[in-house]
Amino acid sequence: MPLAATLIAPRTMELRNRGALKPESNEVVIAVDHAGICGTDLALFSGDYNVSLPLVCGHEFVGTVASAGDGVDRSWLGKRVTAEINNTCIAYNNPSPCPACTRGMSHHCMKRTVTGIIAHNGAFAEEVAVPAGTLYEVPATVDPVTATLTEPLAAALQTFVMTPAQESETVVVQGAGRLGILIVFVAALRGLNVIAISRSETKCKRALQFGASEAWTPDQAEAKIREATEGLGADIVVEATGQSDGIQQALKWVRPRGTLSVKTTCGLSGGKMDWTRLVVDEICIQGSRCGPFEPALKILAKHQEKLRKLITCLKPLTDVQKAMESAAHEDKIILNMD
Ligand SMILES: [Zn+2]
Ligand SMILES: [Zn+2]
């Protein structure tokens, strides 16, 4: 009987033997090899991100397609895959898609569930069922543990899909943790001048290795950002700390007509905001969430040795409770199912 780790109440994971999953039509069942723990999982675990429980968490995963329901191309069977997390009309090949899907905004599908987050059990389990339209094959040349970073890397790329940045513009990334470091990395790949801000000296050092031109602690940030931008402020400030005062802090560093890009789904309210500053300086606030998998997989294939270093810990699924408890200070933990 395949194992699944179910969040039954805040801070309480329960390992259960669950009946073998059967794919519904247009779905596949994937034998999960590895699944990453991210900030969203921690927000679900703490209860800050309030969703309906019980829920099997886990949305950053790699595995092998074990079975396929009606309507699924049989050539997926046996392939090593990862999957987008939004289960939409398009992903289910629904003949009458909702208005959001019809308008090409399937990430905002009005009928969507989200694997491991909203009304769809996820991948902290030996098996997960997802619609076939979410699948991407993981190239044989990409190490499957590193490939669990596809989803967060895609989310990092989405920052600059929603806020297209010109080369040589200055982007400040506030928070250089699990997601922030990937944003630093993709921003540097785009030729942006990246300034990373983190409370942790270790994370500052790491940000420099991943493409930041400067990295500072929050008490140094104000002076250094002004120095780097002739006093004007940064073109884009990405808030990736998930702290409730994060947005207010980030707003101070954006130049007039610049963009404050908000990235974390921490489940907390944004706290207070200086609306007057926002209006007077004509600042744009841009949220962004899930991103494109194809370019993420290409970046992974090219830079996997470097990106592999971001994974700091591997644990068996049976240690899921401890893994969730320690993930907040452990950085990137990957659960192994075998
Ligand atoms: Zn995630
Ligand atoms: Zn839809």
Image: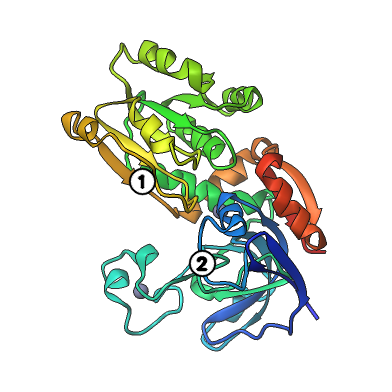
**Dot 2: few (<14), some (14–19), or many (≥20) neighbours within 10 Å?**
few
The image shows residue 285 at horizontal and vertical percentages of 29, 41
Q: Which three-letter amino acid code belongs to the residue tagged 2? A: Val
- What is the secondary structure assignment of the residue under circle 2? loop
The image shows residue 191 at horizontal and vertical percentages of 42, 28
Q: Which three-letter amino acid code belongs to the residue tagged 1? A: Val
Residue 1, quarter of the rendered image: bottom right
Q: Which residue is mark 1?
A: 161
Q: Nearer the viewer, residue 189 or 151?
A: 151
Tell me which numbered mark, 1 or 2, is placed earlier along the sequence: 2
The image shows residue 261 at horizontal and vertical percentages of 36, 40
Left or right of 281 on screen, residue 241? right
Q: Which residue is mark 2?
A: 51
Residue 103, quarter of the rendered image: bottom left
Q: Residue at x 35, y 28 (%)?
A: 167
Residue 334, visible in the rendered structure:
no
Disc 1 under 8 Å from ligand 1? The reply is no
Tell me: residue 168, above or below residue 186: above
Tell me: residue 210, above or below residue 12: above
Name the colour scheme. rainbow
- What is the secondary structure assignment of the residue under circle 1? helix
Q: Quadrant of ligand 2?
A: bottom left
Q: Nearer the viewer, residue 293 or 88?
A: 88
Q: Residue at x 35, y 85 (%)?
A: 95
Q: Nearer the viewer, residue 79 or 277?
A: 277
**Dot 1: few (<14), some (14–19), or many (≥20) neighbours within 10 Å?**
few
> Which of pointers 1 and 2 indicates the residue nearer the eye?
2
- As measured in the structure, the alpha-carbon distance from the residue carrying label 1 to the one carrying label 2 is 28 Å
The image shows residue 213 at horizontal and vertical percentages of 50, 19
Image quarter in which the C terminus is found: bottom right
